[in-house]
Image: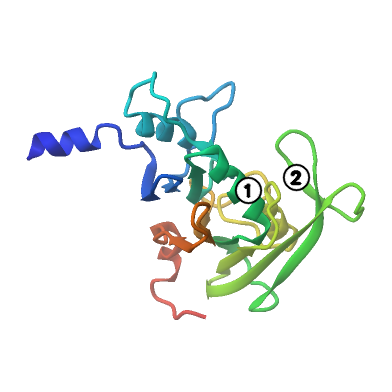
Amino acid sequence: MQEKKKKRSRHQPKGQIILHEDRDIIVVDKAPGFLTMGTDREKERTAYYTLTNYVRKGNPKSRERIFIVHRLDREVSGILVFARTEAAKVNLQEQWPDIEKHYIALVHGNPPENEGVFESYLMENGVHSVKSTPDPNRGKLSKTAYKVLQQSHGISLLDINLLTGRKHQIRVHLADNELPILGDKKYGKGRDNERRLALHAKSISFKHPYNGKPCHFETRVPHLFTHHFKNTDAG
């Protein structure tokens, strides 16, 4: 029995928990610290690399492959969807503006209202950096809905509904509104002791690219997002 167990897990993708897989898609819960895809400096510690190895079962000559549908920042954990065919990739990316995506974020401060929408034009500001601009000709309109889940001692846990999908959108919008994410060294206060960015892609809902049936996938909330509120009531 032990032998079989080892054999089955031999090519399991490091740093990813597979939530669902079928002939068209693979949905995973990505660990923080893994890129979505490789760069010149890092090619193997990525979701794409480990999942490619998984579908090929370690055989580099296999024709099996996966296709990137969207990305998460290295520091962000949570749901990533990959396609198994080019047609599935195209279908999902065409759906993307209408796909419901929820994140959870642990932030410094308390929002002025229990729920609302942050909105601005976002533009790239140098390498790997984004900022808001008042000029609609320079940036893309971006909208981030939030809802307060819990609060305690100047820390808030937010549910984030990503209404548009721009680079670093959640991080910039929260920092702009004096609600920087814990552990965000790029846009945050940079003075907390969190080892990782407290942002997690919690759930996603879309139509299956093959049969059009509604799909909903959700992850467990990591301990990082709950330990601040052990002795407090929700709200």
Left or right for 59, reference 184: left
**x and y percentages locating residue 93 in the rendered image:** 63, 48
* 163 sits left or right of 11 in the view: right
Question: Residue flagged by tag 2: what amino acid is it?
Answer: Val
Query: What residue is drawn where x is 69% and y is 53%?
Result: 169
Q: Nearer the viewer, residue 225 or 231?
A: 225
Q: Which circle marks residue 164 in the picture?
A: none
Q: Which residue is located at x 39 percent, y 40 percent?
A: 15
> CA–CA distance between discs 1 and 2?
23 Å
Q: Is residue 83 left or right of residue 11?
A: right
Vertically, is 211 above or below 185?
Answer: below
Q: Is residue 39 visible?
A: yes
Farthest residue, direction front: 211
Q: Nearer the viewer, residue 23 or 76?
A: 23
As drawn, 13 above or below 116: above
Measured along the vertical axis of the image, is residue 141 above or below residue 117? above
Q: Nearer the viewer, mark 1 or mark 2?
A: 1
**Mark 1 or mark 2: whose residue is earlier in sequence:** 1
Type of the residue with mark 1: Gln
Q: Quadrant of the N terminus?
A: top left
Depth check, front residue: 50 or 189:
50
**Residue 37, percent from left and from top:** 54, 33
Display colour scheme: rainbow
Residue at horizontal 44 percent and vertical 81 percent from the top: 233
Q: Nearer the viewer, residue 43 or 106?
A: 43
Q: Looking at the picture, how far across and down is residue 75, in whole percent?
A: 53, 44
- What residue is shown with label 1? 93
Tell me the residue that label 2 is attached to.
130
Disc 2 element:
strand
Q: Residue at x 74, y 66 (%)?
A: 118
